[in-house]
């Protein structure tokens, strides 16, 4: 996972802090700074998928939004195919946005209810002046075909579509400008399981035919397993473990990753229940615990004072496998 | 099976829709029994009718537009809940049968302390004094795993996390020691580590309090770990019912098989997921014949014209609404 010629996406030390808010004229409550993303680095080779996993409040969506500069990062670097995205001025940024697109979680909220599918898909073609006007409809039909939708849907409004169809429209819209890098932020978590499988398969097919690079964000480790080449696990704004998917699922080194894996319900009643039930909730990112951010919930038998005071560094445990736990070098169990 | 505590027979809940798109037959002839102390999982995707079914049990479906058809029957303690006068129904609702909803954020009153909300049912149904109700509330908050319940009892919902709010909802449901707990997607809005906590809690409470639990969920993984028996719903009907192990080992209905195959799984290698083609039809226009036939890889002429009944598969307590049960030789995809 080190930088190489084939690395399309290179994120280094990404930080996003929401600043402290003072009470307004003594009214309301003062808020501490929120360290939503606190030094996140990763690379994604061209044509591959990095799965970014975490629970609510882990900062995974903030990572997505800052990469696309839908939210301005506090600091850090994001190089897309060698071009630094952060700090880019509006005009070149607009050009670069063609190369990176996002598919949102909520297919209900992310489509304009007053635009037909055709209008939604024609708009990016017009904005980026990609296709001459007379050819735009043909492109719309081609896109619909590519995401498995019938062209008769072109003149329907979002409310006339099912959830799965809406998400396909969202994917078609992202693809319309022919991006190289696609951020998928929980693209299937609002969908029923049978439809979810259809959309996951579609994303896998599109990656193969178009050579797309994905940052696939999800809270569901089982979903990520079916699409990701590498996996990064986030907790309280930091990556706590990062490795090729088979390694994360096979030999996880961070106790949080192990707990997450064990908490996924397995659809097999004969499977021995071996859930590690974590105590408590994810702490507030306004007031992260000192030391290792996971220590208040950590079930590791060797947890000690060092965990409570000294934050563990994210470091290489075996080649390509990074973990941030003081005991990560010791084999589990 | 021990005596059922709840018997649902031929429940039909329809909705009259505006703009003439017809009647939505959301729940269309559902029958099942819930035994004392068991957990029965009701599984299905959006639009299968599972939530309307659970709301119908306590007559929480708004009427109009909803409408429970005559002939439907929900037997609890020897009486039909559907014909009970409002006063007697209120004595059952929240008291003998309680409910936990999916959305802990929106199901709690934001301007009342949680303790007052948990205690309310005990004040109304059991005529406890305020002091007694408060004491029982604190005990229950402790039972459902809320740390420092003496202090938290006066907190407002916004001061609690999602998982803690769901624990409050469960405490609220349990305050009158109900015989039946209806839990509608109790963990869907929660993170996976919190979901594990809540499922663990529900299982423990069921054993300690000897409740029967009706667990309504879209997640077969949740059912596999918690339910004794499973009812699979599709298009307003029960399409398969079986003891949990049988259902997962030998699913009979192609919808159940398809649902199981489309779950991304941690315990299996990465591979292409199998999906069910198409999507659930609208409740105003269920297909004729077998309601699953347009999406079924095995469907033949009979499936398009004749609606199958629930057929016994030969294993105890296992039946499926599919002609394949009668003609197993046809189980080869077309």
Image: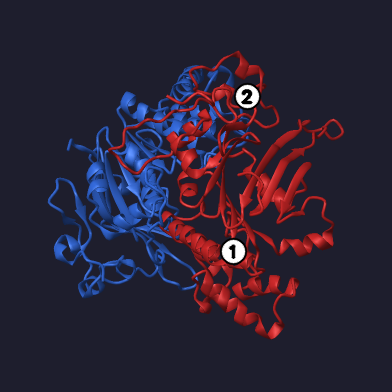
Chain colours: A red, B blue
| Rendering coords of residue B261 (x, y %) | 34, 54
Give the residue displayed 22% in from the left and 45% down from the top.
B246
**Chain-order first, disc 1 or disc 2:** 1
| Classed neighbour count for the residue bearing mark 2: other residues with Cα under 10 Å, few (<14), some (14–19), many (≥20) | many
Instruction: Let me know if marks 1 and 2 both belong to one chain.
Output: yes
Tell me the quadrant of the picture where the C terminus of chain A can be found. Answer: top left
Question: Dot 2: what SS?
Answer: loop
- From the viewer's side, name the closer residue of A158 and B114: A158
Q: Chain ID for label 1?
A: A
Using the rendered view, name the quadrant where residue B28 is placed: bottom left
> Does B51 appear above or below A158?
above
Question: Dot 1: what SS?
Answer: helix
Give the residue displayed 44% in from the left and 55% down from the top.
A192
Residue carrying label 1:
A170
Using the rendered view, name the quadrant where residue A100 is placed: bottom right
- The residue positioned farthest toward the bottom in the image shown: A134
Residue carrying label 2:
A292
| Rendering coords of residue A296 (x, y %) | 57, 22
- From the viewer's side, name the closer residue of B264 and B179: B264
User: Disc 1 vs disc 2: Cβ atoms closer than 8 Å?
Assistant: no
Measured in 3D between alpha carbons, the distance from the residue under mark 1 to the one under mark 2, in whole angstroms, is 39 Å
**Does A300 sit left or right of A314 as displayed?**
left
**Does A86 sit left or right of B292 as displayed?**
right
Q: Nearer the viewer, mark 1 or mark 2?
A: 2
Please say whether residue A63 is visible from this viewpoint: yes
**Does B218 sit left or right of B153 as displayed?**
left
- From the viewer's side, name the closer residue of B24 and A144: A144
Please say whether residue B12 is visible from this viewpoint: no
Which label belongs to residue B101?
Answer: none
Give the residue displayed 59% in from the left and 61% down from the top.
A212
Give the total number of marks visible in the rendering.
2
């Amino acid at each position: 996972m080190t930088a190489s010629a084939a690395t399309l996406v290179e994120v280094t030390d990404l930080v996003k802090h929401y600043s402290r808010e003072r009470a307004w004229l003594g009214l309301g409550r003062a808020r501490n700074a929120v360290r939503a993303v606190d030094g996140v680095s990763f690379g994604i080779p061209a044509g591959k998928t990095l799965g970014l996993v975490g629970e609510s409040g882990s900062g995974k969506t903030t990572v997505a939004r800052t990469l696309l500069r839908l939210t301005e990062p506090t600091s850090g670097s994001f190089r897309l195919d060698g071009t630094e995205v952060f700090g880019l001025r509006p005009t070149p940024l607009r050009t670069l946005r063609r190369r990176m697109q996002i598919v949102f979680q909520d297919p209900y909220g992310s489509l304009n209810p007053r635009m037909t599918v055709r209008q939604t898909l024609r708009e990016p073609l017009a904005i980026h002046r990609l296709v001459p006007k007379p050819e735009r409809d043909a492109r719309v039909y081609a896109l619909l075909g590519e995401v498995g939708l019938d062209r008769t849907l072109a003149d329907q409004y979002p409310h006339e579509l099912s959830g799965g169809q809406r998400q396909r429209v969202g994917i078609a819209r992202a693809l319309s400008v022919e991006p190289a890098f696609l951020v998928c932020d929980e693209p299937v978590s609002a969908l029923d399981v049978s439809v979810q499988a259809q959309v996951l398969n579609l994303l896998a097919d599109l990656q193969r035919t178009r050579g797309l690079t994905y940052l696939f964000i999800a809270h569901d480790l089982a979903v990520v397993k079916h699409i990701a080449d590498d996996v990064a696990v986030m907790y309280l704004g930091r990556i706590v473990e990062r490795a090729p998917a088979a390694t994360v699922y096979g030999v996880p080194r961070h106790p949080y990753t192990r707990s997450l894996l064990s908490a996924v319900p397995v659809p097999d009643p004969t499977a021995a229940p071996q859930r590690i039930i974590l105590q408590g909730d994810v702490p507030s990112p306004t007031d992260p615990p000192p030391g290792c951010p996971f220590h208040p919930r950590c079930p590791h038998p060797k947890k000690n004072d060092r965990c409570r005071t000294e934050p563990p560094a994210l470091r290489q445990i075996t080649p390509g496998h990074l973990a941030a736990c003081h005991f990560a070098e010791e084999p589990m169990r | 099976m021990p005596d059922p505590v709840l018997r649902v027979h031929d429940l039909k809940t329809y909705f009259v829709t505006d703009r003439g798109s017809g009647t939505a037959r959301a729940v269309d002839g559902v029958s099942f029994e819930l035994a004392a102390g068991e957990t029965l999982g009701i599984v299905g995707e959006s639009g299968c009718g599972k939530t309307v079914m659970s709301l119908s049990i306590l007559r929480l479906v708004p009427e109009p537009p909803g409408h429970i058809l005559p002939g439907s029957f929900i037997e609890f303690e020897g009486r039909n809940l559907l014909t009970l006068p409002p006063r007697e129904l209120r004595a059952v609702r929240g008291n003998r049968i309680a409910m936990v909803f999916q959305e802990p954020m929106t199901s709690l009153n934001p301007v009342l302390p949680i303790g007052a909300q948990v205690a309310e049912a005990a004040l109304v149904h059991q005529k406890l004094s305020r002091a007694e109700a408060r004491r029982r509330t604190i005990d229950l908050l402790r039972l459902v795993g809320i740390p420092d319940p003496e202090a938290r009892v006066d907190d407002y919902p916004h001061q609690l996390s999602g998982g803690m709010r769901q624990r409050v909802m469960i405490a609220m449901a349990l305050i009158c020691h109900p015989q039946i707990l209806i839990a509608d997607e109790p963990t869907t809005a929660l993170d996976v580590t919190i979901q594990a906590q809540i499922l663990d809690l529900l299982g423990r409470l069921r054993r300690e309090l000897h409740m029967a639990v009706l667990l309504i969920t879209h997640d077969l993984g949740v059912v596999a770990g918690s339910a004794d028996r499973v009812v699979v719903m599709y298009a307003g009907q029960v399409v398969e019912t079986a003891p949990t192990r049988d259902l997962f080992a030998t699913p009979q209905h192609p919808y159940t098989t398809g649902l199981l195959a489309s779950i991304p799984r941690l315990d299996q290698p990465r591979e292409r997921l199998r999906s069910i083609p198409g999507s659930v039809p609208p409740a105003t226009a269920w297909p004729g014949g077998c309601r699953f036939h347009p999406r079924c890889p095995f469907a033949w002429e009979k499936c398009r014209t004749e609606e199958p009944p629930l057929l016994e598969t030969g294993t105890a307590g296992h039946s499926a609404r599919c002609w394949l049960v009668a003609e197993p030789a046809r189980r080869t995809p077309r």
